Amino acid sequence: MSLTYVIPDVHGRFDLLSEALHRVHAHAAGNGGTLVMLGDYVDKGPDSSKVIARLRRGMPDGWTFIPLKGNHDAMMVAAWRDPLHMARWLQHGGDAVLESYGGDPFIVPEADIVWLEALPLMHVDSHRIYVHAGLDPGVARDAQPESTLLWKRYPKGDAAGFEGRHVVHGHDSFALGPELYEGRTNLDTRAWRTGRLVIGVFDDALPGGPVDFIVVQPEQELPRSETAPGFFRGKP
Protein backbone atom coordinates (compact mmCIF):
# COMPACT_ATOMS: atom_id res chain seq x y z
CA MET A 1 0.00 0.00 0.00
CA SER A 2 1.38 3.39 -1.03
CA LEU A 3 0.45 6.21 1.35
CA THR A 4 0.58 9.99 1.33
CA TYR A 5 0.92 11.75 4.68
CA VAL A 6 -0.17 15.37 4.95
CA ILE A 7 0.95 17.75 7.70
CA PRO A 8 -0.90 21.09 7.88
CA ASP A 9 0.11 24.49 9.24
CA VAL A 10 2.70 24.21 12.03
CA HIS A 11 3.43 27.95 12.42
CA GLY A 12 6.75 27.77 14.21
CA ARG A 13 5.89 24.80 16.45
CA PHE A 14 9.10 22.81 16.03
CA ASP A 15 8.07 20.53 18.88
CA LEU A 16 4.93 19.44 17.04
CA LEU A 17 6.75 19.10 13.73
CA SER A 18 9.44 16.89 15.27
CA GLU A 19 6.89 14.62 16.89
CA ALA A 20 4.82 14.55 13.71
CA LEU A 21 7.79 13.39 11.63
CA HIS A 22 8.57 10.72 14.22
CA ARG A 23 4.96 9.49 14.15
CA VAL A 24 4.86 9.46 10.35
CA HIS A 25 8.01 7.31 10.21
CA ALA A 26 6.54 4.94 12.79
CA HIS A 27 3.25 4.65 10.91
CA ALA A 28 5.05 3.95 7.63
CA ALA A 29 6.99 1.16 9.36
CA GLY A 30 10.03 1.56 7.14
CA ASN A 31 8.10 1.55 3.87
CA GLY A 32 8.56 5.20 2.98
CA GLY A 33 5.85 7.08 1.12
CA THR A 34 4.97 10.64 0.22
CA LEU A 35 4.95 13.50 2.72
CA VAL A 36 3.13 16.69 1.76
CA MET A 37 3.44 19.79 3.92
CA LEU A 38 0.62 22.30 3.44
CA GLY A 39 2.63 25.44 4.17
CA ASP A 40 2.63 28.11 6.89
CA TYR A 41 5.86 27.00 8.51
CA VAL A 42 6.53 30.43 10.03
CA ASP A 43 4.94 33.10 12.25
CA LYS A 44 3.07 32.91 15.56
CA GLY A 45 4.90 29.95 17.18
CA PRO A 46 8.33 30.29 18.85
CA ASP A 47 10.63 28.26 16.59
CA SER A 48 10.16 29.22 12.94
CA SER A 49 13.90 29.16 12.28
CA LYS A 50 14.16 25.57 13.54
CA VAL A 51 11.13 24.53 11.49
CA ILE A 52 12.69 25.89 8.30
CA ALA A 53 16.06 24.31 9.06
CA ARG A 54 14.45 20.93 9.62
CA LEU A 55 12.30 21.05 6.51
CA ARG A 56 15.23 22.12 4.36
CA ARG A 57 16.92 18.84 5.30
CA GLY A 58 14.10 16.94 3.61
CA MET A 59 13.31 13.28 4.17
CA PRO A 60 15.43 10.11 4.01
CA ASP A 61 15.67 7.77 1.03
CA GLY A 62 12.41 6.08 0.16
CA TRP A 63 10.35 9.22 0.68
CA THR A 64 8.96 11.82 -1.70
CA PHE A 65 8.91 15.14 0.13
CA ILE A 66 6.66 17.96 -1.10
CA PRO A 67 6.63 21.12 1.04
CA LEU A 68 4.08 23.60 -0.31
CA LYS A 69 3.98 27.36 0.23
CA GLY A 70 1.51 29.00 2.60
CA ASN A 71 0.37 32.60 2.80
CA HIS A 72 2.51 33.28 5.87
CA ASP A 73 5.58 31.94 4.10
CA ALA A 74 4.79 34.23 1.16
CA MET A 75 4.38 37.21 3.49
CA MET A 76 7.80 36.58 5.02
CA VAL A 77 9.39 36.45 1.58
CA ALA A 78 7.58 39.63 0.53
CA ALA A 79 8.81 41.43 3.65
CA TRP A 80 12.40 40.52 2.82
CA ARG A 81 12.13 41.46 -0.82
CA ASP A 82 10.35 44.79 -0.21
CA PRO A 83 10.51 46.67 3.12
CA LEU A 84 7.09 48.15 2.40
CA HIS A 85 5.63 44.74 3.26
CA MET A 86 7.49 44.40 6.56
CA ALA A 87 4.88 46.05 8.80
CA ARG A 88 2.08 43.84 7.49
CA TRP A 89 4.14 40.71 8.05
CA LEU A 90 5.05 41.70 11.60
CA GLN A 91 1.36 42.23 12.37
CA HIS A 92 0.65 38.66 11.25
CA GLY A 93 3.16 36.99 13.55
CA GLY A 94 6.44 37.88 11.90
CA ASP A 95 7.77 39.26 15.18
CA ALA A 96 7.92 35.68 16.50
CA VAL A 97 10.00 34.69 13.47
CA LEU A 98 12.56 37.41 14.15
CA GLU A 99 12.77 36.32 17.79
CA SER A 100 13.48 32.76 16.66
CA TYR A 101 16.50 34.04 14.73
CA GLY A 102 17.75 36.00 17.74
CA GLY A 103 15.84 39.22 17.12
CA ASP A 104 18.12 40.51 14.38
CA PRO A 105 16.69 40.52 10.84
CA PHE A 106 20.19 40.83 9.41
CA ILE A 107 21.16 37.33 10.56
CA VAL A 108 18.25 35.60 8.83
CA PRO A 109 19.97 33.42 6.20
CA GLU A 110 19.24 34.41 2.62
CA ALA A 111 19.10 30.68 1.89
CA ASP A 112 16.02 30.36 4.11
CA ILE A 113 14.26 33.11 2.17
CA VAL A 114 15.24 31.57 -1.16
CA TRP A 115 13.93 28.18 -0.02
CA LEU A 116 10.57 29.64 1.02
CA GLU A 117 10.33 31.67 -2.18
CA ALA A 118 10.84 28.61 -4.40
CA LEU A 119 8.20 26.42 -2.76
CA PRO A 120 5.43 25.14 -5.07
CA LEU A 121 1.83 26.21 -4.58
CA MET A 122 0.11 22.92 -5.38
CA HIS A 123 0.64 19.18 -5.64
CA VAL A 124 -1.61 16.93 -7.71
CA ASP A 125 -1.76 13.14 -7.75
CA SER A 126 -4.20 10.69 -9.32
CA HIS A 127 -7.01 11.35 -6.86
CA ARG A 128 -6.30 14.55 -4.95
CA ILE A 129 -5.11 18.15 -5.07
CA TYR A 130 -3.02 19.40 -2.16
CA VAL A 131 -2.90 23.15 -1.62
CA HIS A 132 -2.49 25.55 1.27
CA ALA A 133 -5.87 27.31 1.11
CA GLY A 134 -8.04 26.13 -1.79
CA LEU A 135 -9.10 26.53 -5.39
CA ASP A 136 -11.69 28.58 -7.25
CA PRO A 137 -14.14 26.16 -8.92
CA GLY A 138 -14.74 28.65 -11.72
CA VAL A 139 -11.09 28.80 -12.81
CA ALA A 140 -9.06 26.11 -14.56
CA ARG A 141 -6.50 24.42 -12.33
CA ASP A 142 -3.48 25.76 -14.18
CA ALA A 143 -4.93 29.29 -14.19
CA GLN A 144 -5.58 29.58 -10.45
CA PRO A 145 -4.24 32.89 -9.08
CA GLU A 146 -1.60 32.62 -6.39
CA SER A 147 -3.80 34.73 -4.13
CA THR A 148 -6.54 32.08 -4.31
CA LEU A 149 -4.20 29.17 -3.63
CA LEU A 150 -2.74 30.95 -0.60
CA TRP A 151 -5.71 32.87 0.85
CA LYS A 152 -9.02 31.28 -0.17
CA ARG A 153 -11.55 30.40 2.52
CA TYR A 154 -14.32 27.98 1.67
CA PRO A 155 -17.86 28.79 2.78
CA LYS A 156 -18.79 26.67 5.77
CA GLY A 157 -20.33 23.43 4.60
CA ASP A 158 -18.91 23.67 1.08
CA ALA A 159 -18.24 20.02 0.25
CA ALA A 160 -17.09 20.43 -3.34
CA GLY A 161 -13.83 19.03 -4.64
CA PHE A 162 -12.20 20.22 -7.84
CA GLU A 163 -12.47 18.65 -11.28
CA GLY A 164 -13.22 15.22 -9.83
CA ARG A 165 -10.39 15.30 -7.30
CA HIS A 166 -10.55 15.56 -3.51
CA VAL A 167 -8.98 18.79 -2.22
CA VAL A 168 -6.72 18.61 0.84
CA HIS A 169 -5.93 21.96 2.44
CA GLY A 170 -5.20 23.89 5.62
CA HIS A 171 -5.21 27.67 6.21
CA ASP A 172 -8.75 27.98 7.63
CA SER A 173 -8.16 26.96 11.23
CA PHE A 174 -10.80 25.02 13.15
CA ALA A 175 -9.62 23.86 16.57
CA LEU A 176 -12.07 20.95 16.74
CA GLY A 177 -11.16 19.70 13.27
CA PRO A 178 -10.20 18.37 10.92
CA GLU A 179 -13.21 19.12 8.77
CA LEU A 180 -14.18 16.23 6.53
CA TYR A 181 -16.41 16.66 3.50
CA GLU A 182 -17.16 14.54 0.47
CA GLY A 183 -14.94 16.64 -1.78
CA ARG A 184 -12.41 18.19 0.55
CA THR A 185 -10.54 17.84 3.83
CA ASN A 186 -9.39 20.78 5.95
CA LEU A 187 -6.61 19.63 8.28
CA ASP A 188 -5.81 22.94 10.02
CA THR A 189 -6.58 22.61 13.75
CA ARG A 190 -4.81 25.82 14.84
CA ALA A 191 -2.02 23.62 16.15
CA TRP A 192 0.31 26.51 16.97
CA ARG A 193 -2.14 27.52 19.71
CA THR A 194 -4.03 24.35 20.67
CA GLY A 195 -1.00 22.06 20.61
CA ARG A 196 -3.06 19.55 18.64
CA LEU A 197 -1.76 18.71 15.16
CA VAL A 198 -3.66 16.26 12.96
CA ILE A 199 -1.87 14.46 10.12
CA GLY A 200 -4.01 13.10 7.30
CA VAL A 201 -3.15 9.70 5.85
CA PHE A 202 -4.31 9.01 2.29
CA ASP A 203 -4.20 5.78 0.29
CA ASP A 204 -2.72 6.59 -3.11
CA ALA A 205 -4.81 3.86 -4.74
CA LEU A 206 -8.15 5.16 -3.45
CA PRO A 207 -10.07 8.35 -4.24
CA GLY A 208 -11.60 10.57 -1.60
CA GLY A 209 -10.60 11.59 1.88
CA PRO A 210 -8.19 10.22 4.47
CA VAL A 211 -8.09 6.56 5.45
CA ASP A 212 -6.48 7.36 8.79
CA PHE A 213 -5.33 10.18 11.05
CA ILE A 214 -2.31 10.61 13.26
CA VAL A 215 -3.02 12.99 16.14
CA VAL A 216 -0.09 14.75 17.78
CA GLN A 217 -0.88 16.57 21.01
CA PRO A 218 0.65 17.23 24.42
CA GLU A 219 -0.64 15.68 27.62
CA GLN A 220 -2.45 18.91 28.47
CA GLU A 221 -4.68 20.48 25.84
CA LEU A 222 -7.16 23.31 25.71
CA PRO A 223 -10.75 22.48 26.76
CA ARG A 224 -12.83 21.06 23.95
CA SER A 225 -16.56 21.18 23.33
CA GLU A 226 -18.47 18.19 24.70
CA THR A 227 -20.49 18.22 21.50
CA ALA A 228 -17.42 17.66 19.36
CA PRO A 229 -15.23 15.01 21.00
CA GLY A 230 -13.79 13.80 17.71
CA PHE A 231 -13.41 15.02 14.15
CA PHE A 232 -15.97 17.22 12.45
CA ARG A 233 -17.61 15.53 9.52
CA GLY A 234 -19.63 17.82 7.32
CA LYS A 235 -22.60 16.68 5.31
CA PRO A 236 -21.88 15.89 1.64
Image (cartoon, rainbow, N blue to C red):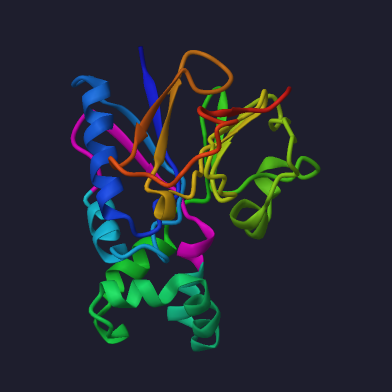
Number of labelled discs?
A: 0
In the image, residue 106 sits, relative to residue 163, either above or below, namely below
Query: Which one is in front, 62 or 197?
Result: 197
Rendered residue at 23%/29% (across/down): 25
In the image, residue 198 sits, relative to residue 89, either above or below, namely above
In the image, the segment drawn in magenta is: 58-74
In the image, residue 87 sits, relative to residue 206, either above or below, namely below
Query: Which one is in front, 223 or 39?
Result: 223
For this view, does 53 lie left or right of residue 4? left
- Image coordinates for residue 44, horizontal then vertical, percent: 42, 65
Query: Which one is in front, 7 or 228?
Result: 228
Quadrant showing the N terminus? top left
Rendered residue at 28%/69% (across/down): 111
Query: Which one is in front, 227 or 207?
Result: 227
Quadrant showing the C terminus? top right
Rendered residue at 42%/59% (across/down): 118
